[in-house]
Image: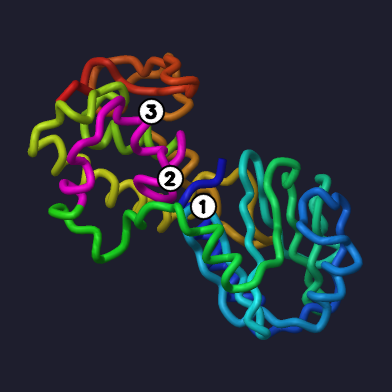
């Protein structure tokens, strides 16, 4: 599932190509991916312009010139591709938005969605999300305070979008590895040193992953050599049975609260 680094990468690339370019066409191949009737959705978008692209957690908000918002959540397996008709990806598309001679293809929206909302509706949709981990206001002191009274496994807390926004399965495991903590470590038992390591690990992993384009499986557009390059940098995620890149252990995979978890039992600990 695309997480904060993937969506931030998309936000940056979208901002380079579609700002103030009039929308000249809309194709909806799956009406369940949108929140309006196809004709109403199309009529509302044709002629509109995106004036700003915002990321919030795992969502992208396209700010339209008339004040409305297009809210995108890719959910599991969603992808974006921007190109000409000749560059059309060999995949099913649920929605296509045309900007002149280029098309923004939305793929994998069978679980995700693209909704046209008012400002108030968009704010309500984002209302329960927790703070952004890379926000400059997210200090160690604030982070420590957020952990007070929290209980349960570390991974379960990290992927809780109401606690911290933007982290999913992959980066929760990578963060735990960076902090030398087991994903199953109990939050209520973490020492102040453990909390400090965790705080720094969150910022480092998400920053590094964002800078090299996250782990998406295909480029955003032809010639894009950045998107997806973090896929080969994962230290533990999806590396079951492989040697730990930090020591002599072997990466294992378990299930924790219904989620797959990857970690090194040799160099990750309870505290």
Residue 170 position in % (x across, y down): 45, 36
Position of residue 41 in the picture relative to residue 141 (left or right):
right
**Residue at x 73%, y 44% (from the top left corner):** 108
**Residue at x 31%, y 38% (from the top left corner):** 175
Q: Earlier in the sequence, mark 3 or mark 2?
A: 2
Calculate the distance from the C-alpha at mark 3 to the C-alpha at mark 2: 22 Å
The residue identified by callout 2 is 161
Q: Mark 2 touching mark 1, by CB under 8 A?
A: yes
Whether the magenta-drawn stretch holds residue 160 is answered as: yes
Q: Nearer the viewer, mark 2 or mark 1?
A: 2
Query: What secondary structure is marked by label 3?
Result: loop
Calculate the distance from the C-alpha at mark 2 to the C-alpha at mark 1: 9 Å
Residue 83 vertical position relative to residue 216 in the rendered view, above or below: below
Kindly identify which numbered label has been placed on residue 76.
none
The residue identified by callout 1 is 58
The residue identified by callout 3 is 236
**Residue sitting farthest toward the right:** 39
Q: Which quarter of the rendered picture does the N terminus lie within?
A: top right
Residue 59 position in % (x across, y down): 55, 56
Counting other residues with Cα less than 10 Å from the Cα at mark 3, is it few (<14), some (14-19), or many (20 or more)? Answer: many
Position of residue 186 in the picture relative to residue 192 (left or right):
right
**Residue sitting farthest toward the left:** 192
Q: Which quarter of the rendered picture does the C terminus lie within?
A: top left
Residue 76 position in % (x across, y down): 62, 39
Whether the magenta-drawn stretch holds residue 149 is answered as: yes
Calculate the distance from the C-alpha at mark 1 to the C-alpha at mark 3: 22 Å
**Residue at x 36%, y 48% (from the top left corner):** 164
- Decide if residue 27 is in sight here: yes
Magenta segment boundaries in residue numbering: 143-169
Query: What secondary structure is marked by label 1?
Result: loop
């Amino acid at each position: 599932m695309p997480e904060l680094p993937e969506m931030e990468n998309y936000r940056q690339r979208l901002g380079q190509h579609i700002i103030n370019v009039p929308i000249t066409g809309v194709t909806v191949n799956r009406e369940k991916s949108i929140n309006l009737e196809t004709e109403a959705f199309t009529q509302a978008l044709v002629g509109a312009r995106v004036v700003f692209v915002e990321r919030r957690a795992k969502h992208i908000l396209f700010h339209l010139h008339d004040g409305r918002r297009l809210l995108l959540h890719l959910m599991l397996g969603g992808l974006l591709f921007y190109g000409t008709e000749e560059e059309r990806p060999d995949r099913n598309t649920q929605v296509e938005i045309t900007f002149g001679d280029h098309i923004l293809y939305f793929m994998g929206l069978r679980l995700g969605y693209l909704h046209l909302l008012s400002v108030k509706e968009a704010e309500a949709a984002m209302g329960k999300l927790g703070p952004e981990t890379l926000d400059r206001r997210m200090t160690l002191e604030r982070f420590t305070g957020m952990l007070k009274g929290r209980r349960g496994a570390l991974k379960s807390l990290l992927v809780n979008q109401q606690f911290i926004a933007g982290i999913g399965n992959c980066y929760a495991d990578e963060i735990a590895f960076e902090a030398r903590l087991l994903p199953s470590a109990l939050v209520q038992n973490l020492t102040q040193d453990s909390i400090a390591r965790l705080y720094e690990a969150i910022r480092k992993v998400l920053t590094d992953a964002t800078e090299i384009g996250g782990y998406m499986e295909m480029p955003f557009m032809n010639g894009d050599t950045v998107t997806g390059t973090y896929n080969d940098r994962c230290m533990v995620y999806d590396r079951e049975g492989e040697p730990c890149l930090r020591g002599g252990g072997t990466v294992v995979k378990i299930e924790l609260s219904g989620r797959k978890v990857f970690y090194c039992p040799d160099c990750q600990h309870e505290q």
